[in-house]
Image (spheres, rainbow, N blue to C red):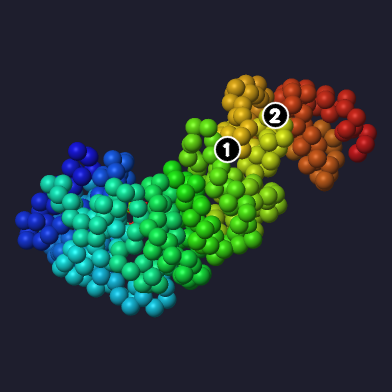
Amino acid sequence: ENLLFAKALPIIAEIKKAGYEVYFVGGCVRDALLNKEINDVDLATSAFPAEIKAIFPKTIDVGIEHGTVMVLRNDETYEVTTFRTESTYQDFRRPDQVIFVRSLKEDLKRRDFTVNALAMTEDGEIIDYFGGVKDLTNGLIKAVGSPRERFFEDALRMMRGVRFVSQLDFSMDSETKKAIFLHRALLEKIAIERIQVEFMKLLLGEGRQKGLNLFVESELYSYCPGLAEYQKELTYFSTLKNKQNHKLLSSLAAWTLLLFILGKQEEDVDSFLRAWKCSKKMIQQVKVALRALTLRVKQPLDKLLLYQSGYAIILEVEELLTFLDKPADLTRLEELTNRLPMKDKKEMAVSGFDLLAYFNKKPGKWLGSALDKIEIGIVLGEITNEKEAILNWLSETNEIKKEDF
Ligand code: ATP
Ligand code: MG
């Protein structure tokens, strides 16, 4: 049995002793039945938040308005959520109000897909009101109840559906698929940050090809930032795989490959990823990786590209090459990494101050360009990274002569 489930047993026992129902619910039940690794277990209970707080001496209100209380016990934390229904969705996103209820079935009914609407008792008995076990067996993502109503209530569920197709490598039930096509434009009502989370899980899923194909077929893509004009490219992207049929390994890898397939350049990255609400750090890394990938499809890895991009990014870029039917050259990566005279500008043996003193000249544009030349010279092995050697090189080279200044 899974350790995470076992750890929750004492909590379950206490809630039951107080006279309430409590079950494992949602993704953990689904993943356990699929024999997949479980990230976290969610507990749902008939006890109201105040009643949970009365049972346990230490709790934190993490999402009390949604009915979630965090229970602290023996250095462990457990999230316990009261059964609830959500009603009157007026803006196609969050429910106007959450109503706590005593019925498990009511709680499961408001969940998005049948495979996510399963509950499990502490003995491992599965409670399945909506045919979730059958759909799990058949590998089917199917809305609970009327798919049209469910997507009209909350348009994010359409992206979630496509994401689960990818994550679980499932297919989508045909009525559910039709409902997405019908309501696809409602995606515009949803915050980009939330769409981005689902889009990334879609790109990183085992069934990326199926998920992306559905993303294109359902035309959800045309309501996502910067993608509307790229049906052809996205369709091509959905066919990409490497020989080992690997998943994409990181958001950085996913964005980089996507932008490459869309034919984007380094200078397009900023506005594209800003529209997706990506972090500054992510944007910076994708720029570097996209530049490196664009060069690497045309030429072997060299010291300067490795130095400018950094080992970690080149490692991801080498893996990405295999999705483009090009070989990764990890041997060369290791060899060049070992031979690289320095990994970072900070390791340079001279500073701007050294040059100012040496040339006895006011700072200006010359200083930055001299430092850049020295940096490249060191990386390429043309200059030894020692102060004296660098200053000698400076006085000998035609590029920067003392008398020029
Ligand atoms: P993951 O493995 O990605 O965490 P998950 O199924 O646990 O998958 P969560 O987003 O963590 O997904 O949501 C937990 C559960 O809450 C889901 O299994 C589902 O039952 C329910 N749920 C989440 N979001 C929605 C939604 N927008 N509409 C209806 N039910 C939802
Ligand atoms: Mg989860």
Point out residue 193 in the picture as x, y percentages from the top left corner: 48, 61
Q: Secondary structure at mark 2?
A: loop
**Place of residue 391 in the rendered image (x, y in percent of width and height, measured from the top left):** 80, 27
Labels 1 and 2: the sequence-earlier one: 2
Disc 1 versus disc 2: distance between alpha carbons?
17 Å
Q: Nearer the viewer, residue 74 or 391?
A: 74
Identify which residue, 324 or 45, lies in the foreground.
324
From the image, state whether disc 1 or disc 2 is nearer to you: 1
Residue neighbourhood size for the residue with mark 2, other residues' Cα within 10 Å, grouped as few (<14), some (14–19), many (≥20): few
| Residue for badge 2 | 300
User: Disc 2 beta carbon < 8 A from ligand 1?
Assistant: no
Amino acid type of disc 2? Pro
In-front residue for pair 353/216: 216
For the point 93% across and 34% down, the residue is 403
Relative to 272, is 159 on the left or the right? left
Label 1 secondary element? helix
* Residue 361 horizontal side relative to residue 21, left or right: right
Q: Which mark is residue 389?
A: none
Considering depth in this image, is 360 or 60 the residue closer to the camera?
60
Q: Is residue 262 above or below residue 370?
A: below
Q: Position of residue 46 (x, y in %)?
A: 15, 64
Dividing the image into 4 quarters, which one contains the C terminus? top right
Q: Which residue is mark 1?
A: 323
Picture quarter containing residue 129? bottom left
Q: Residue at x 40, y 46 (%)?
A: 169
Which corner quadrant of the image does residue 232 belong to?
bottom right
**x and y percent of residue 399 in the render?**
88, 33
Q: Quick one: which residue is furthest to the front in this view?
A: 174
Kind of residue sitting beneath label 1: Phe
